Image (cartoon, rainbow, N blue to C red):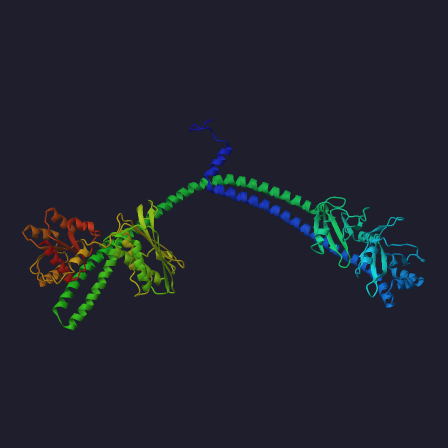
Amino acid sequence: MARPDGGLPKSPIGQWLAHLRASRPLRLLLLIGGLSVAVLLAATVHYIGSMHEREMEGAERELSTLNLSLAEQTTRAMQSVDLVLTTIIDQMKSEGIATPGDYIRRMGGRDTYQMLRARISGLPQLDAVTMIAADGHLINFSRYYPIPPVNVADRDYFAYLRDHDTAEPFISEPVQNRGNGSWTIYLARRISGPDGSFVGLVLGAIELSYFERLYKALQPDGDGSISLWRRDGILLARYPFLPDIGRPLGQRLFLEVLQKARSGVYLAPVGLNDGPRMVATRALADYPLVVNVTRKLEAVLSEWRIQAWTIGAAGTIGVAALLLSLWALARQFSAYEAATQAMDAARLAVEGREQAEHALRQSQKMEAIGQLTGGVAHDFNNLLQAIGINLHVIDSRSDDERITGPARLALQAVERGATLTQHLLAFSRRQQLRPMPVDVAGLVERVSRLLGRTLGQSVRIEVEVAPGLWPAMIDPTQLEMALLNLALNARDAMPGGGMLWITAANRTVAADAVPNLSAGDYVVLKVCDTGTGMPAEVAARAFEPFFTTKEVGRGTGLGLSMVHGLATQSGGGVELDSRPGRGTTVTLYLPRALTEPAAAPAGGTGETAANEIGSGGDVAAGSGCAVLLVDDEELVRTATAEYLAQAGFSVREAADAAAALSLLDHGFRPDVIVTDHMMPGMTGLDMARALRARQDATPILMVTGYAQDLTTTAAAQEVALTVLSKPVEPSRLARSIRHMAAAED
């Protein structure tokens, strides 16, 4: 049956694969299940391998122990025979036998025969002792007397000891008795004269069947073997018996092992008469003999194979059960995931609504605080203006230090109040800014040099500016103050010293990438410290004016609020990241300037232009200049009018814009209009626009403490007015009016 969309229906496997591709948690579940299966298989293989290693190590220890015991017993058996020979040689030396003639003459009697018979009693491995003359014929023999006419000059032991002056024993090749088929080896020692000349030999015949009986008694299992070899690889004895005694047999890998050490354990791929074996080999310390102990590898691993099959079967069953459980769990998880997705969608909707409501409440809160602080700053600036003008009048009218001294102190308080209101206006985004293209890299460099002297040696400053940094559209003076405030806050958060990083880089911000920030190009300026940091509840209020955690007298709580106001009023934004014990990072997003910064800021309208025109000579005298003073605050208007009149200006007052326009309509022609901005009804800017609309070009000087609509020079340039911020020094106000009137003339 075709699907509703016209395609062919998917198979169950296809549906499952499609669901698997769409569900990351399900893929994770299957990945964990697959890893679990892999771990279980790996653990099973590892355990079986560990058991194999332990089984092999145990077998190696057992064979090494048995080999050591057999080597010691073989050594004792050889030492017993050797002791008989060395005792005979010592007796001969004590009797002064030093030449071949003395040896033949004094050791060929029956008493010597009896002595030899006595010496071999109690040594089952020693079959006979023979004394041999320097020419190879027998002098005495423990088995027969008189001595049979036998010469052994052609034997290997005789030829070697005759030609080598050595104190070491010699072990001959095995010799088979033609009568009974038994095998014998000879342990021979050289008899030398005082001058080292060859006197003869003393020889012990050792029956190899002794070692076969010994090895048979010590053989632990029926799957092993024990063998005795000459060091040159000739087989001397073995249990179980092999008919190849006296010949080099097999690969003789033990000879390679014994070239590096006196003992060892190795695996022989092929035994002397069967399959692979584990071989423990050991060379005797005093004799050129080697004892080998072996076990069939199959017998060594027989118990391990049973356990490995059992564990492997259990692991296979466990893997199968795990796969079935994983399949069932995946099916249940699919159903659970569908239900969870529906619940998550509902939860996300609720959380989204709560976050939006919280953001709205926070925005409304900050806006309400901004309106409150802006209004307070406006009224406070008016009060400071009235107080400041009257204090200047008092100071100018008296030479009595008792009067002028307190007046100047009060003027200092007015200046501090003016600074405070500037911070309030900055937070409320109503300060008068002069944005221009700014070289942020150069500004950061200048500020960092200043901070190096300000912060002290306990704070290390690191500056990193990305190459090709864009210019920013910002008020440079306010940006410097913001950097200084952030650096001082960082210093206070690092009482024991620390690191301060200032970085600048370009960033293109997408829509909704940064909260409350429009998409566009920004210069990102970061100030990061290693200080104490702030808990979440403190960081949430950090930008509020007058909020501070410092003790009384160490902060006003306006530093971060001023930074926040500068960034947002300039069209950018600010972010705060702070955690207790991990420092604080403040990130400023400054809008990119579309033009390059000028070599030096050009003069223009606004307060800077007023400063320039007020920097000339003494022009404080009004000289009858007509001024229309417009201000709704009676205290400010009255004090300003009195000061200007005292300075020689002709002043007409108006309480609002309507009254000012009425005076102008009735024929009053002032040289300069001095007006407030925020007034009931029509604002000062609206009045200026109305005048320009009438083609009235009278110079307008706006003196305001609340430049809400004048945060850029565009509004001022639109109506060609000059702006001064309250509170303004009276002499500066007078100079500005006079210069504007003179420029108009």
The image shows residue 460 at horizontal and vertical percentages of 37, 62
With 445 as the anchor, is 74 left or right in this view? Answer: right
Q: Residue furthest top?
A: 1
Residue located 79% across and 48% down the image: 247
The image shows residue 60 at horizontal and vertical percentages of 70, 52
Given residues 43 and 350, the one toward you in this image is: 43
The image shows residue 27 at horizontal and vertical percentages of 49, 41
Quarter of the image containing the C terminus?
bottom left
Note whether 3 is above or below 87 in the view shown: above
Note whether 670 is above or below 332 in the view shown: below
Note whether 482 is above or below 405 in the view shown: above
Given residues 656 and 576, the one toward you in this image is: 576
With 429 as the anchor, is 218 left or right in this view? Answer: right
Query: How many marks do you count on the picture?
Result: 0
Q: Is residue 709 visible?
A: no
Q: Is residue 198 visible?
A: yes
The image shows residue 276 at horizontal and vertical percentages of 72, 45
